[in-house]
Image (cartoon, grey):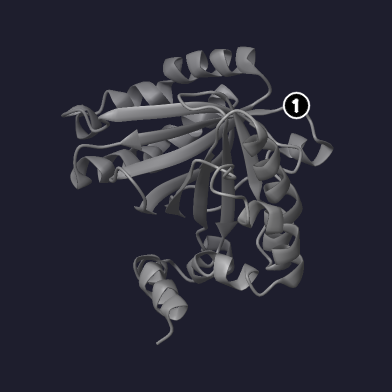
Amino acid sequence: MKRRQFLTSSLAAPVLAAGAAQQSGTDKKRDYYVLRRYQLQNGPQHKLTEGFLAEALVPGLNRLGISPVGVFNVSIGPESPTFYVLIPSTSAEDLVSADFRLEQDAEYMKTAAAFFTAPDKQPAYVRVESSLMLSFEGWPKLTVPSVTAQRGKRMFELRTYESPSDQDHRRKVEMFNSGEFAAFEKAGFWQVFFGDTLIGPRMPNLTYMLAFEDMAERDRMWTAFGASQEWKKLSGSPRYNFEEIVSSITNVILTPASCSQI
């Protein structure tokens, strides 16, 4: 077996197994997500990587039938400058094999040449980190905010919850499916995606993304969320507060790049 075929099949195995357990029917099919984080240094790396994402990666993925692709800058977070790229698909295999298939795309390879051939003294980025996720059963599809089509004003919050054990992680996912979506909706958030990490660092964990118009709206919405009956009922339930089921929370505030389709 060729090395690339082996890598594709071995990486896809856990997500394909998860996919086999999904309910049949197009309307019930759950999304998979790849979330990439391009860690940069101040200087030319930002322009080079932004050009690669806008001119090569997003159009190349679209030609593979993968869309919408989200590209975001970190506005508030522990590491900046950083780009986050969100890549959705209903097929785990399509996501796992995307980079290999892009290498067969002459237009992609030509446009990405400067990014790929950056010298070691002036690299295109510091590091790239990726996670592969399966959407929550209660929020199976990525939802693009309605204002995106008009390139309207929007910001995003990306939150990752780490749990101390698999049991606690499963309880936290269940908590979302049991009422947190309703609490977010009542508070006014635009809910973009909710993903259970299948492959990635610092597992077990989950990641989700909310959107809003600006930071003032965000603060108002979080206050409303905390005061909602839905949240009070969940957070007060012995099923979810018998111990600390979330051990660490990481959140970053993002703004969409000009090439973002989310």
Residue at the extreme bottom: 1
Q: Is residue 17 visible?
A: yes
Quadrant in which the N terminus appears: bottom left
* Vertical relation: 24 (above or below) 1: above
Measured from the top left, where is residue 21 in percent x and y? 37, 68
Q: Residue at x 43, y 17 (%)?
A: 226
User: In the rendering, at what x and y percent does residue 88 appear?
Assistant: 57, 55
Q: From the viewer's perspective, is 193 left or right of 68? A: left
Residue type at mark 1 is Lys
Where residue 129 appears, as percent x and y from the top left, is: 45, 47
In the displayed structure, 216 sits above or below 59; it is above
Neighbour tally class for label 1: few under 14, some 14-19, many 20 plus, Cα within 10 Å: few
Question: Which residue occupies the extreme right position in the image?
Answer: 150
* Residue at the front extreme, as displayed: 121
Please report the residue visible at 61 percent of the width from the left and 72 percent of the height from the top.
101
Q: Report which quarter residue 198 is drawn in.
A: bottom left
Residue that badge 1 annotates: 153
Query: Is residue 137 shown to the viewer in this render?
Result: no
Q: Nearer the viewer, residue 26 or 65?
A: 65
Q: Residue at x 39, y 65 (%)?
A: 15
Say left or right for 123 vs 7. right
The residue located at (39%, 68%) in the rendering is 11
Residue 241 location, x and y as percent?
Answer: 21, 27
- The residue closer to the viewer here, 206 or 139, is 206
Question: Is the C terminus in the top left, top right, bottom left or bottom right quadrant?
Answer: top right
Q: How many marks?
A: 1
Please, what secondary structure does the residue beneath circle 1 have? loop
